[in-house]
Image: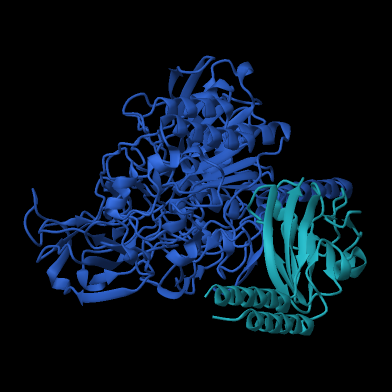
Chain colours: A blue, B cyan
């Protein structure tokens, strides 16, 4: 071999080695590697043929990729090849003939696993719907419910029987480097329970998803609370001796204390959830039980956000998967909107905040975002996260910036940050709608988003965000209608067995605004048509005030409204500045919380809308029922009985109807004008509805067809129409 | 029962006292519209920021002040959407120590009222009047007492996306002592009339 040959060989070897080295250093192209269509069905109810495709997508992530680095514990979820893998469910709703598609995709974020089919109005546009998993905590109160991962999740062939209809994501369980279980402290609570039977550890209506590390109760602490106020003052009762309780089922078909021990085998999850607690002396309904215990096997939950991102990116940009399975909507989508309601609206905000609206190829994933009735950020991307948690004591969700522009967090001592910081840096911010109702103000800790933690200045909105507030509404809006003969009936308070509310359900709807905004969002993205201007109560406009009846201008003397409800211990649920410990990032809400229960460092001041002489809220978008009222529409309710008696009933709003005649209202001392006094007769009421509807249409917050329907409803109603 | 001469003496006394009070009041009397000490020449218009954008114009009839905020495709250097920025039209009185009332009518062509903010310049403090989350067309009435500074500002924040215009009308300036004097005079006349009837 000549020297020249040796030289050439050396060069060749060096080039190959360099290429191999380079390939090993570059981030692998993480992606959806496989899609499986399990079920195909036709869908009726729209003007062109539609079909649904229910399936699963298999994906993989490179933990070293900067787009994934924010995921808590991602390095504890790697396979042997260094990749992190997941499987997610999805439902595509599409025109059978994709040439009839509009190019617009609604990517709906399921609320606690609930699968979403886009509505007929959207199908009539030719839009595509995509519902897919993000909440990866494998928790359901029933098999196939909530976010339960099915046994067939990893089957690479189509599954035709026993298909679940929820959305889920199968993500890795974090393990220590030696393969042992990760353990840590968590918290669960039981309230309004009585008797000898064991009780579940739930968060909202779903199980706390983490098994105890052991059945040894000496490593846990179970205390009782005799009282808790809305503003976070806890009256601690006693510590229940470890010998007097067990992680066990007891009562009913189970033996009495100490009962049947909780199954701790992870292989049996989620069927063995919820974890049950059995008390030797039974549960006292006057007490709240708070358990701090060692749990094991946290999920790498943040992978759920990556799965949501990558699935949309696949359907937007890919033509087929790694195995040649075609993308059924390839090259047909030009605009995508991420949309979530309540919990999933908070997930939408968290998703944007953590930078997931940029895919691994640096492309924008969703051009639009619509977090609905959600003013915070869901707790997902921290170890031991409980994304079902909403607002109750010691639940996450209000950590870090809740606002859309860089704004200092003065009370918590955090620098100026915003939800849009990451997407601004990468030019991947969506155009955003957010709309809210009154219950979010009172129970769902929303006004911190509007006025920051200092609660003294309106936080500006950027140009890519529109905010619409629907005053005097319950969470998600009521059922609508014009009914003057309402039969009083208590309503169930949402939450973890919270109780019942005294006032009948608030009917003020948000449906018509949603209809208008649906059109506006499409026009904004597809045509650049500016949507209606934002409308919400502000401090500057003197419609956002302190939560007391004087500042609010709440009329006194309305029958059934005790003054005690306005006391801080009963009224607005404030944001708490929790100390979750040194391993937790209080801005991004990532990392490992270690303080359970966390210390409350600050109780952050909240604001509420000012009200008119009827007690109905000012400062929101015009809505017909609020502007032609049949009563006082409250964003809050009053808990009738139980541990929370006298406090606001979580996030369900109530209604207190007007009297029909002056004599009736005077008999009860009601200061509000009767229906006859304010409208005269049925025609007068229809005229008021017509005026309100025309005003809302003129301002762009109501579609004409909805206005016509509302006026017709009012004309046919029983209001002053015996 | 007064005699006619007693009544006349007392009436003259009351009127004299009232006139003395009136004479002791500041020189400013009730001013209606942009007249007298509030003539357009008695206001200072300052256009802040780069480039200088916007204007302030008094109507020929001295009944209306029209403030137009900045708006250009290039926007305002340093301006941030929604945050009061360096570009602003200020109109301030040379006679601020008084009590004022006026009506304001705000209209913005921008996408939201928060992007063009209108308010009072009052004793060194910016006090916003327009509702940042309110409609694009807003109005209101103000009655307020100033001492070291009185005027209006219109801050265009980023100064793009459409200009805001504010019309200030029904302007009055009424010295507080004059108001008291008028009240006192009225009470005095009532007292006299009552005694006369008695």
Q: Quadrant of residue A214?
A: bottom left
* Quadrant of the image containing the C terminus of chain A: top left
Between B93 and B19, which is closer to the camera in this rendering? B19
**For residue A626, side relative to residue A521 (left or right):** left
Q: Residue at x 32, y 49 (%)?
A: A665
Q: In this view of the protein, can residue A504 be seen by the observer?
A: no
Q: Residue at x 64, y 80 (%)?
A: B7
Q: Quadrant of residue A675?
A: top left
Q: At which x and y percent is residue A262?
A: 19, 56
Between A116 and B111, which is closer to the camera in this rendering? B111
**For residue A118, side relative to residue A181 (left or right):** right
Q: At which x and y percent is residue B3?
A: 60, 81
Q: Quadrant of residue A593?
A: bottom left
Which residue is farthest left? A256
Between A546 and B142, which is closer to the camera in this rendering? B142
* Quadrant of the image containing the N terminus of chain A: top right
Q: Residue at x 54, y 40 (%)?
A: A339
**For residue B35, side relative to residue A690 (left or right):** right
Between A534 and A268, which is closer to the camera in this rendering? A534
Q: At which x and y percent is residue A486?
A: 30, 38
For the image shown, how many numbered marks are present on the structure?
0
Residue A514 higher or lower than B190, as above or below? above
Q: Residue at x 50, y 32 (%)?
A: A687
Q: At which x and y percent is residue A424?
A: 70, 53
Q: In this view of the protein, can residue A562 be seen by the observer?
A: yes
């Amino acid at each position: 071999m000549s020297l020249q040959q040796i030289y050439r060989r050396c060069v060749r070897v060096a080039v190959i080695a360099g290429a191999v080295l380079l390939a090993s250093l570059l981030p692998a192209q993480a992606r959806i590697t496989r899609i499986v269509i399990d079920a195909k069905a036709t869908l009726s109810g729209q003007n062109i043929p539609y079909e649904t495709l229910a399936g699963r997508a298999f994906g993989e992530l490179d933990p070293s990729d900067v787009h994934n680095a924010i995921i808590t514990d991602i390095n504890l979820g790697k396979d042997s090849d260094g990749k992190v893998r997941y499987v997610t469910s999805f439902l595509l709703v599409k025109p059978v003939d994709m040439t009839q598609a509009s190019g617009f995709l609604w990517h709906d974020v399921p609320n606690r696993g609930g699968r979403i089919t886009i509505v007929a109005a959207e199908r009539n546009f030719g839009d595509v719907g995509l519902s897919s998993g993000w909440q990866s905590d494998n928790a359901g109160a029933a098999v196939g419910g909530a976010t339960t991962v099915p046994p067939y999740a990893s089957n690479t062939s189509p599954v035709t029987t026993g298909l679940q209809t929820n959305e889920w994501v199968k993500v890795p369980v974090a393990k220590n480097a030696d393969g042992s279980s990760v353990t840590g402290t968590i918290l669960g609570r039981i309230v309004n329970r009585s008797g000898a039977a064991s009780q579940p550890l739930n968060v909202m209506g779903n199980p706390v998803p983490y098994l105890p590390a052991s059945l040894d109760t000496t490593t846990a602490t179970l205390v009782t609370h005799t009282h808790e106020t809305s503003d976070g003052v806890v009256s601690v009762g006693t510590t229940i001796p470890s010998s007097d309780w067990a992680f066990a089922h007891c009562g009913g078909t189970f033996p009495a204390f100490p009962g049947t021990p909780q199954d701790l085998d992870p292989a049996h999850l989620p069927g063995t959830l919820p974890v049950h607690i059995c008390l030797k002396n039974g549960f006292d309904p006057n007490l709240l039980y708070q358990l701090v215990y060692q749990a094991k096997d946290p999920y790498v939950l943040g992978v759920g956000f990556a799965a949501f991102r990558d699935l949309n990116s696949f359907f937007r940009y890919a033509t087929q998967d790694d195995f040649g399975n075609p993308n059924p909507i390839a090259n047909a989508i030009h605009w995508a909107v991420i949309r979530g309601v309540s919990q999933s609206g908070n997930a939408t905000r968290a998703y944007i905040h953590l930078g997931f609206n940029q895919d691994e190829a640096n492309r924008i994933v969703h051009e639009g975002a619509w977090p609905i009735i959600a003013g915070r950020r869901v707790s997902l991307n921290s170890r031991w996260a409980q994304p079902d948690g909403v607002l109750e004591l010691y639940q996450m969700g209000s950590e870090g910036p809740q606002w859309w522009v860089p704004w200092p967090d003065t009370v918590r001592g955090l620098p100026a940050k915003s939800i849009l910081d990451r997407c601004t840096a990468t030019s991947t911010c969506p155009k955003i709608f957010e709309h809210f109702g009154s219950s979010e103000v009172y129970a769902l800790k929303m006004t911190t988003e509007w006025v920051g933690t200092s609660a003294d200045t309106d936080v500006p909105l950027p140009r890519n965000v529109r905010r619409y507030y629907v005053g005097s509404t319950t969470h998600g809006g009521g059922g609508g209608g014009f009914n003057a003969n309402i039969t009083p009936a208590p309503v169930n308070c949402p939450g973890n067995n919270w109780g019942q509310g005294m006032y009948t359900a608030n009917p003020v709807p948000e449906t018509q605004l949603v209809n208008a905004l649906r059109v506006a969002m499409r026009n904004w993205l597809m045509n650049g048509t500016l949507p209606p201007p934002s409308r919400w109560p502000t401090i500057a406009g003197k419609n956002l005030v302190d939560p007391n009846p004087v500042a609010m201008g709440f009329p006194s003397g309305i029958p059934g409204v005790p003054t005690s409800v306005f006391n801080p211990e009963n009224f607005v649920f404030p944001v708490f500045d929790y100390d979750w410990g040194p391993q937790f990032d209080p801005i991004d809400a990532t990392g490992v919380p270690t303080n359970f229960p966390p210390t409350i460092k600050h109780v952050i001041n909240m604001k509420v809308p000012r009200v008119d002489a009827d007690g109905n809220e000012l400062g929101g978008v015009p809505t017909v029922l609020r502007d032609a009222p049949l009563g006082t529409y409250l964003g809050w309710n009053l808990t009738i009985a139980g541990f929370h008696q006298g406090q606001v009933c979580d996030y369900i709003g109530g209604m207190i109807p007007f009297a029909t005649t002056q004599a009736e209202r005077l008999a009860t001392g009601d200061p509000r004008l009767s229906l006859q006094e304010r409208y005269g007769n049925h025609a007068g009421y229809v005229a008021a509805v017509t005026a309100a509807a025309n005003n809302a249409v003129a301002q762009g917050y109501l579609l004409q067809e909805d206005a016509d329907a509302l006026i017709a409803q009012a004309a046919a109603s029983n209001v002053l129409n015996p | 029962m007064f005699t006619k001469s007693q009544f006349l003496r007392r009436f003259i006394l009351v009127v004299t006292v009232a006139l003395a009070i009136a004479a002791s009041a500041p020189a400013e009397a009730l001013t209606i519209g942009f007249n007298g000490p509030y003539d357009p020449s008695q206001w200072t218009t300052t256009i802040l920021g780069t480039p200088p954008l916007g204007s302030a114009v008094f109507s020929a009839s001295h009944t209306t002040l029209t403030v137009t905020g900045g708006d250009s495709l290039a926007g305002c250097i340093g301006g941030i959407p929604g945050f009061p920025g360096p570009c602003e039209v200020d109109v301030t009185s040379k006679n601020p120590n008084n009590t004022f009332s006026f009506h304001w009518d705000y209209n913005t062509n921008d996408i939201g009222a928060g992007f063009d903010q209108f308010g009072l310049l009052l004793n060194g403090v910016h006090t916003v009047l327009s509702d940042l989350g309110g409609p694009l067309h807003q109005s209101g009435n103000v009655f307020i007492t100033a001492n070291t500074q009185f005027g209006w500002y219109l801050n265009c924040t980023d100064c793009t996306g459409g200009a805001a215009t504010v019309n200030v009308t029904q302007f009055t300036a009424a010295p507080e002592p004059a108001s008291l004097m008028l009240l006192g005079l009225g009470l005095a006349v009532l007292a006299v009339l009552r005694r006369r009837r008695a």
